[in-house]
Structure formats: structure tokens, C-alpha cells
Amino acid sequence: MARTKAGRLFSRLTPSTERTLADVLRTERAGGMLLLAGTILALVWANSGWADAYETVKTTVVGPHALHLDLDLQTWAKDGLLAIFFFVVGLELKREIVAGELRRPSTAIVPIVAAVGGMAVPATIYLTINLMSPNGSTDGWAIPVATDIAFAVAVLSIVGRWLPNSLRAFLLTLAVVDDLLAIIIIAVFFSHGISFVWLAAAVVSVAAFGLLIKRGVTTAWVLVPIALLAWGFMHASGVHATIAGVALGMVVPAIARKGEKHSLAEHWEHFWRPVSAGFAVPVFALFAAGVAFNGEAISRAISDPVAQGVVAGLVIGKPVGILLFTFLVATFTKATLDRGLSWWDVLGMAGLAGIGFTVSLLIGDLAFTGDRVEEVKMAVLAASVLAAAAGAGILVWRDKFYRSVFERRSKPVPNTRLAPKADLERELERRARSGQIRTGANAADANE
């Protein structure tokens, strides 16, 4: 029986993934910067003399009471604006499953297993710390399992200009799978008092949305009201409203129709990504990241097992889980890293995956109330900074290595056949004097 040739990890990408990779790396860097700006503004505002105004703005209630949508601005940002973010995630998932790296088992297995490891190990570390502590809480086990792709790609675009594209694609695909698993966690573990009537109405709305698109209806005047109905029904059902965004994204076709250059999923992803990365997520960060730092609050966070579990899970658990499970894939499938890559590269990327932020803050808000929410926010912010620094440090070192390799390979190799004629003549004379070659009569004598 012929033995199947072992594959290579992080090897050639599909054309669709190459195009998407270039697009994501262009847009997510700006989105990451805006997300950082929103976070800094929130922190400055919450720790300034206008801190009371910040709390007033966050808790301002708007929306119709008759529809049970009289929500404060912080909740609108969490449940409403993040639905746009998760709609883009749904589009990404559909495209990756149909036409990207998740389409083939050979390329899907690595990011899927790595994402599972990047969730299982942080959750285990969090639970271990909190089960061993008398005042611990297991409610926040899902907080350290998320990856914030906007922040991670923003850091990567700054420190990893010379890194191979296969590593970048690995981080992006892993984050997409990570988002899918986080969505499942939110839907299963953070849904309370589910009303199956409203849930059925949401499912019908999503199905109608997909059916209309399949029949060629793409006008916003028809689809946007249906999407809003799906979101409203999902919100009323008790399932987190952002799940509606994912479901809507997943029913959009990801294969281009005859005569079309791009699929509708790809087209809408390009359209909605700037809205998500440039507005929805930064505004969410503005309302979610504002936490007052003072000696007492920091001391409480440091001694809180929940905060300890979040930091340890993101900073240690994420990279260890991703690296360990990727190594297991290589061991059991006898696959190897692509030529020129190192396990240090994988560790650096895994370190960036520890930047939890957006989804971690969302899950923290869903898991806790009161003062502990503030401690979770401190922990998520601190862990994201530490993970970014650790991952960036490794990738800066590896980036210098890849740049030196590129420069060595790009250096022109001396070639005597292309040397000037005078240089060739001098070289021949030198060799003749040293006896390396024979010229004139000496050459003729040697032939006789």
C-alpha cells in the first residue's frame, strides 16, 4: 500500500484567500487603530474630571418602550453595533467554508485544531485558578477564549512586514474559527429565559432574508427591514442579539454567480467591513473599555481570582494552547512546517491571539455584574497589552530574520561571464602567471 505523502503546515494559499488576505490587511490595520483610539478615549474620559459625564452618557436610555427596546447607549453598542461586527464575521465564515481555507480538510484542520486548543487551554487555566480559590467564580471561563482580530492584525501590520503570508493567513483563519466558537459559546451559555416563539420568528426572518437573496433581491429597502426584524426577534427571544448578525451573514451566497466577478458575500464583506471596523467596534470600545484606575481598584483586580484567570488564560493559555495543538497536528499527521518557517513563528502568532479585547469584554459583560465587571475589564486590558507585547517581541525578532534572508537572496551574485572585458583579461593573466591555466605556446605544448 502506497504511503500518503505528508503535507506541510502553512503552505500555499488559495487564490480566494490571497485576495481576501490582502484586503483584510489593508482595512483591519486602520480599524485596529480606530479601536485603539476608542479604547484610549474611554480610559482618559473615565479617569478624568468628566467621569460622571461618561457614566451619564453610557446609561442614557433611548428607544421605544412599547417594543421593549428602551435600552441604554452601552447596551445599544453591545447588542446593536456589535451585530454589524458579527454580520461581517458571518460573511467571513461563509466565504472561508465555501471558498477559503476551511473548504478543504487538509487546510482547515490546522486552524480548527489550533483554535480549539487556543480555547480549551485558557478555559482550563481560568477554571483551575478559580476552583482553587474560595472567592473564585467559574462564570467567566469563556472570557479568555476570544481573539480580537482587529487588534492582532494591527499589531502584525506594524511588526511583521517581512513575515510569510502563510503565517498571516494562519492568524486570520484561526481568528475566524475562534469567532465561530465564541459565537457558539455566547449562544449556548449566555442565553437566558429563551422564548421559542420569538426565536422561531427570528429564524423565519433569517430564512426569508436568505431566500430573497437567492432569488436575486439585493435592494437595501427590502433586506435591511427584514434584517432589523431578525435582530429584534432574536433580542426578544433571550438569545444574544448579535447571533442574528452571524445568521444573516451565513445565508449570503459565497460563490459568484454566472457573469459576476465576486460573490455577494465578498462584495458585502468589503462594503460592511469599514462600517464594522471603523465605527461599530470603536464605539463599542468607547462604551465598554472605560474603567476607572485607582489604587483600590487595581489592588482588588490583582487579588481577584477572576482577573487572575483572565490574564493567565489570555497571556499564557492562548499561546500554549495554539502551539501545543498545532504541534499535535504535525505529530499525528506527520506534516511539517512549510520550508523556511520556524515554531518560533507559530509561537509569535499564537501570542498575538491572546489579544482578546472586543469579544472578551462582551463575554465579561454577559458573565458578571457590579464591581466584578470593572475588574474583568482591567484584566482584559492588561492581558491584551501583555499578549501584544509578547507576540510582537517574538515577531520583531523573526521579522528581522526574514528580512535578512530576503536581503541575502536579493544580493547580486558575482558572475565572471558578465564581468567587463578588462576585468576578464586581468583575471586570465593572473591565472596564467600562477599556473592555473595555460596560454599561447604553453597551451599548444600541453596539447602535443
Image (spheres, rainbow, N blue to C red):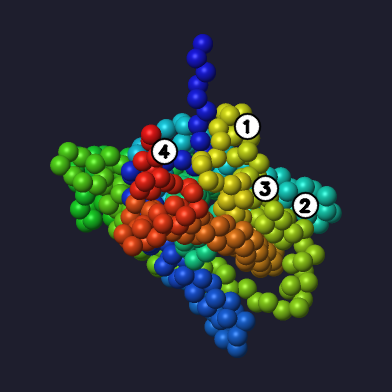
The mark that comes first in sequence, 2 or 3, is: 2
Q: What's the amino acid at mark 1? A: Thr
Label 3, label 4: how many angstroms apart (C-alpha)?
70 Å
* Helix, strand or loop at mark 3: helix
Front of the two marks 3 and 1 = 1
Residue 128, visible in the rendered structure: yes
Foreground residue among 188 and 234: 188
Q: What's the amino acid at mark 4? A: Ala
User: Residue 417 appears at what percent x and percent y?
Assistant: 34, 51
The answer to whether 312 appears left or right of 238 in the picture is right
Foreground residue among 437 and 81: 437
**Residue at 59% of width from left, 47% of height from top?**
342
Q: Which numbered disc covers residue 331? A: 1
* Helix, strand or loop at mark 4: helix
Q: What is the residue that sits farthest to the top in this orientation?
A: 1
Q: Which numbered disc covers residue 320? A: 3
Q: What's the amino acid at mark 3? A: Val
The mark that comes first in sequence, 3 or 1, is: 3
Front of the two marks 4 and 1 = 4
Residue 354, visible in the rendered structure: no
* Residue under label 2: 130
* Residue under label 4: 446
Foreground residue among 75 and 326: 326
Q: Give neighbour class at mark 4: few <14, some 14-19, many 20+ (Cα, 10 Å).
A: few
The mark that comes first in sequence, 3 or 4, is: 3
Q: What is the residue that sits farthest to the bottom in this orientation?
A: 49
Front of the two marks 1 and 2 = 1
